[in-house]
Image (cartoon, helix red, strand yellow):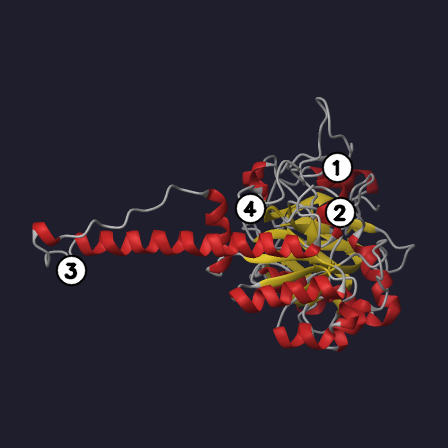
């Protein structure tokens, strides 16, 4: 990437480093992939000081205001959206002990902990946040990882900010659950898949009963404060008002799933595990999102009929019965899906999203659908496509700048912009 004009390269970098946060900036692209529409050759994006995109179109029609810093790149895409990660809760040091402990993605004291909030563990200054940003990821759906029946809540964050408040886009988005052997390997109970499903169903029924108690108490309180039945009983015949149950944070979180406020993100890889998740969704009627879904290609009709989106495992991950072609098969079947980086048990704990999408592109998905699978598609599934995922006027000015084809191994990411703030300007 280079700066337009006659200034020297060193002077250009110095000037770029001086850009204040959320300064207005323009980007000239040899090819601009908006994702929401056809690519535009020789295009310009103008990002406003409010962090939003002000203008998009051909360079010949651009009216770049005086004094606006202009960057240049061969290819420009929306900032990448990682559909499922534990970055920010898991760190680069891979340590579970001592003062450098940086692994907070899985609490092993209990298999059911829906009350755990990713917000309380996310470290905006973690090295991995900067690392994934350097590969073009500007938005993360992150939180408690797989390995517990219910491991905790997820959140959505931008890969910038000095603290969690500055980084957070959505403090709570889903409740993360896991089915199968990954749970029994971490806990004595459940030891089998059937036991795990029984425990999860019991927890959901308990949450439903809790919600019913809360609502009855609220309705009774409303009646006593002027409702239709507030003055109809004589003292001797009055029935005691239902009392609200003691507050239970775990049941509240599960209740949010039952009420449709949160999605249940279920890590399930085998046909049996995914079928169990679909039955559970049919029983309780919650919003289900399948996570990882290694054998999804064997259950395409059922997943499509259920209207359930898939956050697919990283294409190259070592998951049993995984396939390089699953992404293409999901796309061909009309199933909403996104490619994720997931969680690795070894350093650096996460994968490079653009590389995972490149492998899917080369195995039937194609360039355009692969780019959508790591931008607009995850944004839609997460419910944040009004802000991120494509380059459109009014959306967040989150951009990734490349010196060549984003899916070509020899290409480099040469700039990252988040809400008009230039986060980096060096080719990686």
Q: Is residue 330 left or right of residue 107?
A: right
Give the answer, above or below, for where 417 lies relative to 96. Answer: below
Q: Using a 10 Å C-alpha cutoff, classify the residue at mark 2 as few (fewer than 14 neighbours), some (14 to 19) or many (20 or more).
A: many
Residue 229 circle label: 3
Give the answer, above or below, for where 139 lies relative to 11. Answer: below
Q: Which residue is mark 4?
A: 114
Which comes sooner in the sequence, label 1 or label 2? 1
Q: Using a 10 Å C-alpha cutoff, classify the residue at mark 4 as few (fewer than 14 neighbours), some (14 to 19) or many (20 or more).
A: many
Q: Is residue 349 left or right of residue 259?
A: right
Q: Residue 331 or 268: which is nearer the viewer? A: 268
> Is any part of residue 1 visible from this angle?
no
Q: Quadrant of residue 394?
A: bottom right
| Nearer the camera: disc 1 or disc 2 | 2
Which quadrant does the C terminus fall into? top right
Q: Using a 10 Å C-alpha cutoff, classify the residue at mark 1 as few (fewer than 14 neighbours), some (14 to 19) or many (20 or more).
A: few
- Residue shown at the point (74%, 71%) measured from the top left: 39
Image spot of residue 343 (x, y percent): 75, 47
Pointers 4 and 1 in contact (C-beta within 8 Å): no
Estimate the spatial distance between the alpha carbons at disc 4 and disc 2, rounded to whole Å.
19 Å
Q: Helix, strand or loop at disc 4?
A: loop
Which comes sooner in the sequence, label 2 or label 3? 3
Q: Which residue is mark 2?
A: 343
Image spot of residue 130 (x, y percent): 73, 40
| Nearer the camera: disc 3 or disc 1 | 3
Pointers 3 and 4 in contact (C-beta within 8 Å): no
Q: Which residue is mark 1?
A: 14
- Residue shown at the point (78%, 54%) measured from the top left: 353
Q: Helix, strand or loop at disc 3?
A: loop
Which comes sooner in the sequence, label 3 or label 1? 1
């Amino acid at each position: 990437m280079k700066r337009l004009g006659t200034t020297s390269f060193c002077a250009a970098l110095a000037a770029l480093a001086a850009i204040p946060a959320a300064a207005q900036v323009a980007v000239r692209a040899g090819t601009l992939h908006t994702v929401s529409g056809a690519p535009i050759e020789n295009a310009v994006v103008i990002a406003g000081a409010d962090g939003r995109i002000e203008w998009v179109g051909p360079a010949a029609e651009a009216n770049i205001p005086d004094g606006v810093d202009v960057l240049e790149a061969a290819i420009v895409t929306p900032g990448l959206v990682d559909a499922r990660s534990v970055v920010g809760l898991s760190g680069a040091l891979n340590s579970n002990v001592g003062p450098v402990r940086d692994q907070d993605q899985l609490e092993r004291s209990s298999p059911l902990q829906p009350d755990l909030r990713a917000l309380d563990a996310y470290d905006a200054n973690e090295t991995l946040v900067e690392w994934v940003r350097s590969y073009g990821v500007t938005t993360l759906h992150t939180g408690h990882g797989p390995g517990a029946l219910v491991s905790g809540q997820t959140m959505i964050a931008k890969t910038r900010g000095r603290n969690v408040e500055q980084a957070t886009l959505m403090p709570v988005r889903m409740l993360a659950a896991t089915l199968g052997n990954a749970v029994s390997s971490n806990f004595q109970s459940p030891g089998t898949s059937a036991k795990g499903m029984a425990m999860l169903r019991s927890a959901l029924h308990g949450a439903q009963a809790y919600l019913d108690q809360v609502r009855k108490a609220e309705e009774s309180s409303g009646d006593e404060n002027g409702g239709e039945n507030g003055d109809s009983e004589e003292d001797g015949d009055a029935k005691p008002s239902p009392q609200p149950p003691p507050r239970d944070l775990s049941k509240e979180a599960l209740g949010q799933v039952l009420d449709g406020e949160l999605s249940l993100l279920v890590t399930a890889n085998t046909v049996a595990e995914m079928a169990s998740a679909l039955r559970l969704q049919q029983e309780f009627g919650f919003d289900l999102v399948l996570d990882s879904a290694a054998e999804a290609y064997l259950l395409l009709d059922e997943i499509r009929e259920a209207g359930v989106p898939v956050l697919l495992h990283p294409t190259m991950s070592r998951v049993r019965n995984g396939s390089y072609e699953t992404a293409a098969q999901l796309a061909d079947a009309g199933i909403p899906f996104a490619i994720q980086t997931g969680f690795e048990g070894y350093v650096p704990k996460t994968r490079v999203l653009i590389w995972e999408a490149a492998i899917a592109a080369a195995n039937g998905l194609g360039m355009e659908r692969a780019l959508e699978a790591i931008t607009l598609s995850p944004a839609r599934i997460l419910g944040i496509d009004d802000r991120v995922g494509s380059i459109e006027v009014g959306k967040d000015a989150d951009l990734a700048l490349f010196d060549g084809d984003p899916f070509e191994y020899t290409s480099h990411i040469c700039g990252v912009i988040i809400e008009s703030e230039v986060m980096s300007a060096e080719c990686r």
